[in-house]
Structures are given as structure tokens and as C-alpha cells.
Amino acid sequence: MEKIELDNYQYERALRDQGISLIAGVDEVGRGPLIGPVVTACVILPKTFALKGLTDSKKLSFKKREEFYDKIQEQAIAIGIGMCTAEEIDQYNIYEATKIAMKRAIQNCPVRPEHILIDAMPLELDIPTTSIIKGDLKSITISAASVIAKVTRDRMMIELSEEYPMYDFAKNKGYPTKKHREALFQYGVLKEHRRSFHPVEEALEKKGEFV
């Protein structure tokens, strides 16, 4: 059976048919990790943008993400990054913190979008939005935002891993792998850990802070 290619320009094309040209894609990375911020990106691409193979960042290899990151940075009309720290995640909960981070990415975008395509999450904004389930697969603009957010956060985790190699952040990117959880109970909780997440709460009770 012939494989049907997904049309990941359909939302952008429909908006451009309405005369809308500054279309932003917004996506997040880092809702599941035990440590570090949730990172979001707002990306506006030119009409002529084309990058074969660009899709949800989680489906791309490390090498391909890095390659696409550079190409998106070179070609994008504008890019904004937003974050919510571990402390803010503990304060607001991860869902609300993600929405805050998304709004920050939009605010930090140097060009104001006319319409925003968002991966799954609804946002209340003064700009028209379309929330798309699995948007990082269905919209090229959201895919671009996914790559920017993913590479940005991964680089932060690699940097943190250089300071605390025993937690294996360069490989696990802060997600609750066996090695990460074992390190929590062996060495303790870092200031960057999300204290409202259960494995971290448990490690705090049994081991305490990293000393």
C-alpha cells in the first residue's frame, strides 16, 4: 500500500488564503522531566520556508535536530523563547507553568504574529489562535517551534550535566530514568529539581538536598 504523506502545510496555507502572513507556531518541551525549566518557542517562518523531514522534534535524531535548529534559526522571520523555572512549576503546577512559558515565548518574539498555531494547549491571548492536537506533526510551523524548544532545553541539560555528571542529564535530559532516580537517592536533590514531582519529593524525605 502506498504511504500517504502528511500535509503539514495545510493550516498555514489556509491562513495565507485569508491574507494572513505572519503565522507563528508555538510548542513546549520539558513537561515530564524532574528537573529544570519547561521551555517553549514561538517561531514565525517565511512563506517560502521548506525543510524536508522537519517534524515533531521527539521523532528526530540528535544530529538532525541540531541541523534543523541551525536552518530554522537562519531562515525564520522571528523566534521567541519562553521558560518557567522549576520553582515556578512548583508554584503554579506544570500545566499552568507551560501556558505561562508559552505566553512568554510569544511576548519575546520580536515580530508580533497575526495568528498563532499552538500544539494542543489552548491559550487566552489578544491574537487569534488555533490549537491543534498533535500539532507538532501536522503543522510545519509548530514542528519548527518544537525543534527550537527541544534543542534549547537539551543544551541546558547538557550544561547542567557537566556540573553534576552523576545524574546523567546529558543522556536523560532530566527525565525520570532509573539512573536519574537512583542518583537522587544517592546524592540528594539539586536546587534545579522540581520539588512538587513525586520522585523528588520522596528523595527529599529520604536523602535531602545535594550537599
Image (cartoon, rainbow, N blue to C red):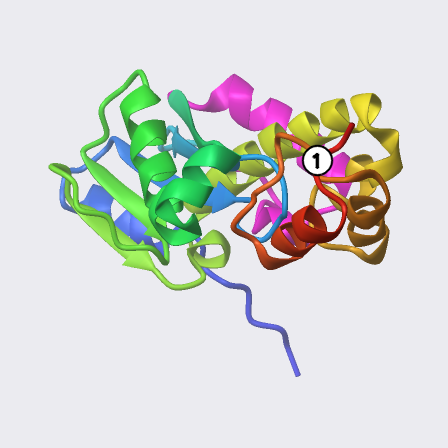
Residue 175, placed above or below residue 198: above
- Total residue callouts: 1
| Front-lying residue, 169 or 67 | 169
Please rate how many residues cluster around mark 1, counting C-alpha atoms within 10 Å: few if below 14, some from 14 to 19, many from 20. some
Q: Quadrant of the N terminus?
A: bottom right
> 76 left or right of 62?
left
For the point 38% across and 32% down, the residue is: 42
Q: Whole-percent x and y of residue 181? A: 78, 53
| Front-lying residue, 168 or 191 | 191
For the point 86% across and 45% down, the residue is: 186
Q: Whole-percent x and y of residue 198? A: 60, 58
Residue 11, placed above or below residue 77: below
Q: Whole-percent x and y of residue 25? A: 37, 40
Type of the residue with mark 1: Glu
Magenta region: which residues?
Answer: 50-77
| Front-lying residue, 54 or 196 | 196
Magenta span dominant secondary structure: helix
Q: Is residue 141 visible?
A: no
Residue 138, placed above or below residue 28: below
For the point 25% across and 30% down, the residue is: 22
Write down the residue under mark 1. Answer: 209
Find numbered disc 1 in the image and state the secondary structure of the residue it sits on. Answer: loop
Does residue 3 show up magenta in the picture?
A: no
> 183 left or right of 32?
right
Q: Is residue 29 visible?
A: yes
- Res. 64 image quadrant: top right
> 146 left or right of 141?
right
For the point 35% across and 45% down, the residue is: 92
Which residue of the protein is positioned furthest toward the bottom in this rendering? 1
Which residue of the protein is positioned furthest toward the left in this rendering? 126
| Front-lying residue, 109 or 38 | 38
